[in-house]
Image (cartoon, rainbow, N blue to C red):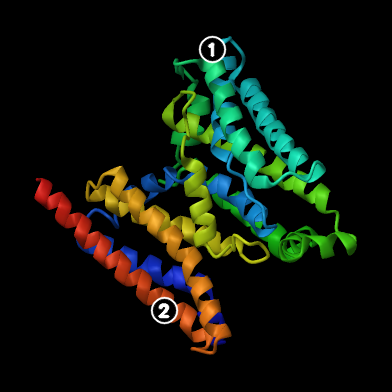
Amino acid sequence: MAKRFLRWEWLLVALIVVMSVVNTRLSPFFLEPTNLLRASSDFMEIGIMMLPMVFIIITGNIDLSVASTLGLSASLLGYLHNAGWNIWLAAAMALLAGALCGLLNGALIARLGLPSLVVTLGTFSFYRGLAYALLGDQAARGYPEAFTLIGQGRLPGTRVPYALLLFIVLAVIFTLVLRGTRFGRYLYAIGNNEAASRYSGVPVRRIKLMIYTLSGLMSALAGMVLAARFGSTRPDIGSGLELTVITITVLGGVSIAGGVGTMVGASLSLLLIGITRFGMGLMNLQGQVQGIAIGALLILSILLPQVGGWLAKRHVWGRATLLPVGAALLVAVAFGWFFFWSRGLMLAAQ
């Protein structure tokens, strides 16, 4: 029983509680249900892209092109809508385009054996360039209300956004696939030892092709949600979100080396990042300051397990005790210092 409470997920739960208490003390508007639910809508497209990213990183790979795939799919949607296409047919074509983008990534990585970092770094620029080729410096507008409800609407009689409901349904599906299917076990096997998995009969190439195609499809779906929420599409839509998606995934305990991680941890990480940014937004902190906090979280999430493993090998302290306690202390101190330092900057500027 004790080992369960030493898992990374429980550290995230503790951080969520700490951040909620800090935000509540700093702003009386933090705990208002309407504000919390409205803020959740701002992160659902990130969460949708995060789900297949967990699969990809567990296998020891990465996808840097998710935000560019989002931008290309959303731009294609806007382009076709401006050309007079039915919005739902245009959305279907955009989803297909996203899947094809992922399929191209997967084919280059799985079939040709190219490094995922190099391939997706190239398609990161390529897909964004295609988005600009479609819309130029113009924005597509005038989406029908039935479409914008995906990003702006609420469940009838409630304050729950449709986008939040969509993410929850997808998160449950992805969690069940990862934890309860042979496909999920194959993902962990590939991440732990790809060569051994291949010799054991695991269809490594086919699985890589599938997860990258799925990533492209989910990125396109995130593009639909984001375009619906904004009510318009520009070719730079979603720029920079790929780093946030990777940060959330790794902070959730998914090892960048592969073979380790859970969907629950990634979802808790999404919640932590969400309430952190929401709290800083209520304090009117600039986006650059928020970026510092998120970047520090990413560094800590990668550094702490490495330090814990290094000390455990040298018998400095038991890893089971060192990692959670040390991580909790360091992160708590870092967060406390950062929040009060940034708040002081804000008050000084006023």
Foreground residue among 91 and 340: 340
Q: Please tell me whether mark 2 or mark 1 is closer to you in this view.
A: 2
Q: Is residue 338 left or right of residue 262?
A: left
Residue 326: assigned label: 2
- Identity of the residue drawn at 39% across and 68% down: 15
Seen in the picture, residue 330 relative to 92 is either above or below; the reply is below
Quadrant hosting residue 178? bottom right
Residue 70 in picture, x, y percent from top left: 56, 34
Foreground residue among 36 and 195: 195
SS state under label 2: helix
Q: Is residue 299 left or right of residue 57?
A: left
Q: Amino acid at mark 2?
A: Gly
Q: Which residue is tagged 1?
A: 82
Q: Is residue 2 left or right of residue 173?
A: left
Residue 138 in picture, x, y percent from top left: 45, 15
Residue 301 in picture, x, y percent from top left: 47, 64
| Residue extending farthest top | 83
Seen in the picture, residue 267 relative to 67 is either above or below; the reply is below
Q: Amino acid at mark 1?
A: Asn
